[in-house]
Image (cartoon, rainbow, N blue to C red):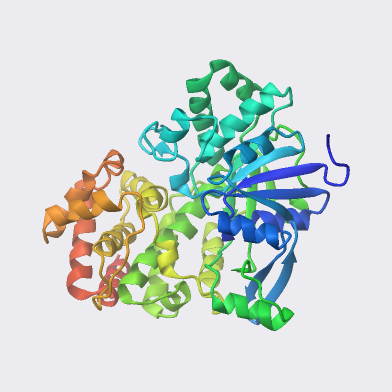
Amino acid sequence: MRSPELAERILHFGLGAFHRAHQAAFTQDAGGRWRIEAVSMRNPALSDALNAAGGVYHLVERHPEGPLLIRMTVIDRAHCLAADPGAVVARIADPDVRIVTATVTEKGYGFDPATRRLDPSHPSVAPDLARPEAPRGLVGAIVEGLRLRRAAGHAGLSVMSCDNLTGNGHLLAGLVDDFARRRAPGLADWIAETCSFPDSMVDRITPASSEATFAAVREATGQDDPLAVETEPFRQWVIEDVFAGPRPAWEAAGALIVTEVAPFETMKLRLLNGAHSMTAYLGALAGLPAVRDVMAEADLRALVRAHMSAAAATLAPLPGYDAEAYADTLIERFSNPAIDHRVLQIAMDGSQKLPQRIFAPARDRLGRGAGVETFALATAAWIRFAEGRDEAGAALGLNDPLAGPIRAALARAGTNPEDRVAALSRVEGLAHLGLLSDPRFGGSVARHLDWLTGKGVRATVAEVLRGLAEG
């Protein structure tokens, strides 16, 4: 029976900082009777802490002139999938829940990047196929919850990915369909008929919380808040208008509800996310801890802006949006001195991120006969990062689903840069892309890798900038 005071609910998978700074903020600002139940995928400590706090935490917006504190109350309940999968799937079956959303990062979807189909051997999928009634992964949990919802005779709902994946709604729909058909074709048909999977694009820089985050809350409120999250003032959410039922008035909080998300998504992936990856790997190698530190160096800042222009040239026109003006805005955001966005946070999962952020626009430029210098440099910096040491010899951890195969391939290849690039081009999970084995791109990557190894980041960047200036 629906409670009259809280009639509409969202169940969100991925109780991380980004959700608490982005979708939760939009939903709270949209008003109405909508509330969020958030699901921690593995760590019960986070969900327990949020429940103990009654769902209250603080959002610290880092403005250049000083922080702005916002008291967040829209998440009123939390669960942990690993601790109690039954409770989570039961919530999907509840008619009060109208929307399921997710921010579980690219690696949480369990798909084969070569086919964009469900990978039945993936660690977030295989156990759920074996024991579907007690799921531990996103897709298995959604399917089991929808199975219970159908059995209870309730209507379908809207399921929305908010992760940085091309066509994230269509991707998730295909994964859910594939998983459901392995269980019962009739269930898959019901999902296709009654549920919707809107594409969405999200954008808000959200650094990991630090002692400075907690100190800002303590100074303003006199209380400790271990759940506090910090973020930048800017935020963007573009959502495809294909909902299966009611939704919050997110447009009242500034979200764009559109017929097609893809152009916005591509612009963001190639300009913001691509430049972020480049910044992260070069910054980590040079011993620069945060994006703002990279942007404080004139040559590095100029390189990042040049890369954005090269990426912008691969975009189709988007009416009402100027890609170069968007790039200028990104430079300002990256340079915000109040945002301590650590490069190692951005550097995680490069094998999952670079295909959309760097390789796809590089392939487009090669197809047009255009240069790929900055894309090759970004890729070379990733390879050099994967070697595990910065320029001063300090260790760099490789937090990546393909860390083992990548490190093994590099170890077998020896020190020759061409051999190292060729070895990575054969790593399962990267080989399907074909770009590293293209001599036009792979050769350029090897050249930049040689420069980074021999000259270091700053001399290499100066060399690339000279080449771009000469044309």
Q: Is residue 261 left or right of residue 26?
A: left
Is residue 167 visible in the rendered image? The answer is no
What residue do we see at 12% from left, 61% from top?
Answer: 415
What residue do we see at 39% from left, 62% from top?
Answer: 347
Foreground residue, 315 or 422?
422
Foreground residue, 246 or 10?
10
Residue 24 at x, y = what percent?
Answer: 68, 55
Please tell me how many numbered marks the rendered image carries.
0
What residue do we see at 63% from left, 66% from top?
Answer: 227
Q: Quadrant of residue 76?
A: bottom right
Foreground residue, 78 or 258?
78
Residue 325 at x, y = what percent?
Answer: 56, 63
Residue 403 at x, y = what percent?
Answer: 30, 53
**Quarter in which the N terminus is drawn:** top right
**Quarter in which the C terminus is drawn:** bottom left
Work out whether 415 lies above or below 200: below
Q: Is residue 191 left or right of residue 293?
A: right
Find the residue positioned furthest to the top: 186
Work out whether 354 lies above or below 207: above
What residue do we see at 58% from left, 16% from top?
Answer: 186
Work out whether 117 lies above or below 137: above
Is residue 301 visible in the rendered image? The answer is yes
Foreground residue, 277 or 313?
277
Find the residue positioned furthest to the right: 4
